[in-house]
Every structure is written in C-alpha cells, then in structure tokens.
Amino acid sequence: MKKARPLLDSIINSGKYDLISNFFDNFRIEKENNVESVYEIQANVNDVEESLNAEMGIGLNFPHAGDIGMCCGFHQPSQNLANAFKTDENGLPLFDTFDDFNLKNDQGIQSAEEFIPAGDYLDPRIDWTIGRRGIPYLDWGIMRGYDWIRKQEDGGPYLPALKPFFTNRSGMNFPLQ
C-alpha cells in the first residue's frame, strides 16, 4: 500500500481522470474509455469469426448455469475483491482492515439450501461489480449461487463482472454475439 500510494496520488492529481456520475457506465461497452478509465484493453467484438480474433476471455465470463443456458463461468471474482467493498457505518472504505475477515458468502452451500446474504456495511457498487447469491443479478433475476457457479470449490462463490452482458443503452442484458 505504501509503494502504491505515490502512484495513485499522481494519477488522482493529474487532472486527466475523474469519477463518472453513473458507476454502471463503466460496464457499458459504448461508454468505454471514459474519464474514469486509467487503463483499458481494446478488443474486437461481433466479428465474422465470432470474436475469435479479439478478447475471447470476455466470452468465458458468462455464468455457468444450465437454467440460463450459458457458458463458461471463468474469471470469477476473488474473496479479496468482495471484501474490498466492505465499509464502516459511515460508508467509508476499510483500507487497512477490509481483509481481516471474509464477507459472508455461500461457499459450499447448495442452491436448494437457505442462505441469507451478508448484512455487513457495503459499498453499493459491489452488486454492479460482482454477482452475489441472493442479490439481483441485473435482469437475470436473483443470483442462485452454487448452481450458477462453474466449480465453486475451485473459483469461489461469486460471478464475474457484468461487462459482457451489456451492449446497448436500454440496460437490458444481451450476451455479446
């Protein structure tokens, strides 16, 4: 953290970057390279070769769930990332203690079993960034946990960032095709 601080301060104070008013715009393809972007990889989509010439990894982010018919469930968010969204009662981030204990999750709990999501203080952007059991996963409905995870014992209980699901302004989920 001490080594990263000078770099982060220089980025913040450069005047080149700012926070955008709608956090979710960071996940919309038509809003890429906005003033909040420090680094973005450019990739081709919707090409004749089904994006095989582009960022194939994006296609691997879809939930792995028979009931919604997707593949492949790779690139799952880590517990460390989920923990980073914990805040104190004032909504301020827990920079030094966020990883002292894990955010409650459904690791190892089958989808048919009851699970009540964490009641911790959280930055609301968590649910625009990762999919958590018991929380709406945009218009896919309530994230059902274990059944939507490719191999929870290997990758953990969270679904990946939602960027691959959004390609239009309506806010509807459309897989890249």
Image (tube, rainbow, N blue to C red):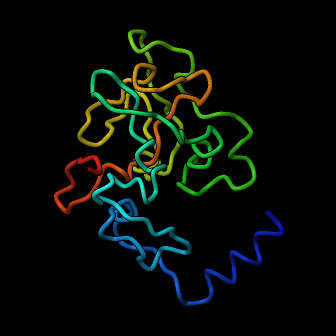
In the picture shown, does residue 101 fall above or below 94?
A: above
Q: How many marks?
A: 0
Quadrant assignment for the N terminus: bottom right
Residue 38, given in percent of the width and then of the height, sits at 55, 75
Q: Quadrant of residue 64?
A: top left
Residue 168, given in percent of the width and then of the height, sits at 21, 60
Residue 68, given in percent of the width and then of the height, sits at 27, 28
Tell me: 165 left or right of 77: left
Farthest-out residue, top: 113
Residue in the picture at 30% in, 60% down = 47
Tell me: 27 left or right of 79: left
Farthest-out residue, right: 2
Farthest-out residue, front: 49
Residue 71, given in percent of the width and then of the height, sits at 38, 33
Choose between 82 and 154: the one closer to the eye. 154
Q: Quadrant of residue 134?
A: top left
Tell me: 14 left or right of 32: right
Residue in the picture at 51% in, 70% down = 40
Residue in the picture at 39% in, 34% down = 63
Farthest-out residue, bottom: 15
Residue in the picture at 26% in, 32% down = 141
